[in-house]
Amino acid sequence: MLSLSEATSTDFKTIQYIANKTWPVTYGGILSKEQIHYMLNLFYSEKALLENLNQKGHLFLLVEEDGVCLGFASYEHRYLNQEVTRLHKIYLLPEAQGKGAGKFLIDTIENLARQNHSVAISLNVNKFNKALSFYKKIGFEIVAEEDIELGYGGYKMEDYKMEKVL
C-alpha cells in the first residue's frame, strides 16, 4: 500500500538518491551526460534543496510502499503570488513507474491545492520527456513553450508549460 510523508532536510539524501537514479533514465536520450550532471548539481545539491525548502517555500512529499521510498514531489502554493500551485519536481525510481505512485502524489497535491484555494496546478516538462503523455492523460494541457537558459555551457531547458484547472 502506498503512503506519503512530508520530507524535511533529513530526507535530502533520499531525494538526491532518487534524482541520481531517475535523471539518467529520464533524460539520457534527451540531454548530454554533462548537462545531466550539471543540472543534478544545480537542482539537488544540499544548498539548493535547503534554499527551496527554507527560503522559497517549497514543500516536499515522499511516496513509499512497504517502507521503501519510491519517489518524491516538490510543490509550492501561491506560486508567483497567484492562486496557482506549482509542481516543481516529481520523480519516481524507474522500477516504481507505472504502479500508480505518480498519480497518487499528484492527486494528493491537487487536494492540497484545492484546500489552499488554488484554481490550477502548473508545471514545466521537457518537450521530449515521456512523462508528457502521463500529464496529458491526467488532465494537464500545454499552455506555452518555454526555453530557459541555464547560464552555463549553453545549456538550456526546452520545456512545455502545462496547467491543470481545478
Image: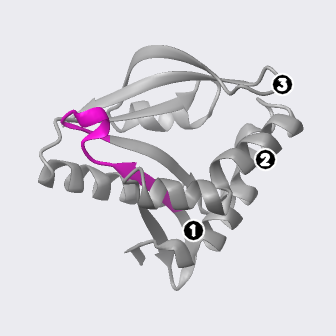
Name the secondary structure under disc 2: helix
Asked whether the viewer can see residue 52, the reply is yes
**Is residue 5 depicted above or below 131 in this figure?**
below
Q: Residue at x 42, y 65 (%)?
A: 61
Mark 3 is surrounded, within 10 Å at the Cα level, by few (under 14), some (14 to 19) or many (20 or more) other residues, namely few
Asked whether the viewer can see residue 100, the reply is no
Residue at numbered disc 2: 24
Tell me residue 73's x, y (percent): 47, 56
Residue at numbered disc 3: 153
Name the secondary structure under disc 1: strand
| Mark earlier in primary sequence (3, 2) | 2
Q: Which residues are magenta?
A: 72-85
Seen as rendered, the residue at the extreme front is: 55
Foreground mark, 3 or 1?
3
- Along the viewing direction, whichever of 112 and 82 lies nearer the viewer: 82
Labels 3 & 1 near each other (Cβ < 8 A): no
Q: Look at label 1 and name its amino acid.
A: Leu
Q: Look at label 3 and name its amino acid.
A: Gly
Seen as rendered, the residue at the extreme bottom is: 67
Q: Is 53 positioned to the left or the right of 33 in the image? A: left
| Mark earlier in primary sequence (1, 2) | 2
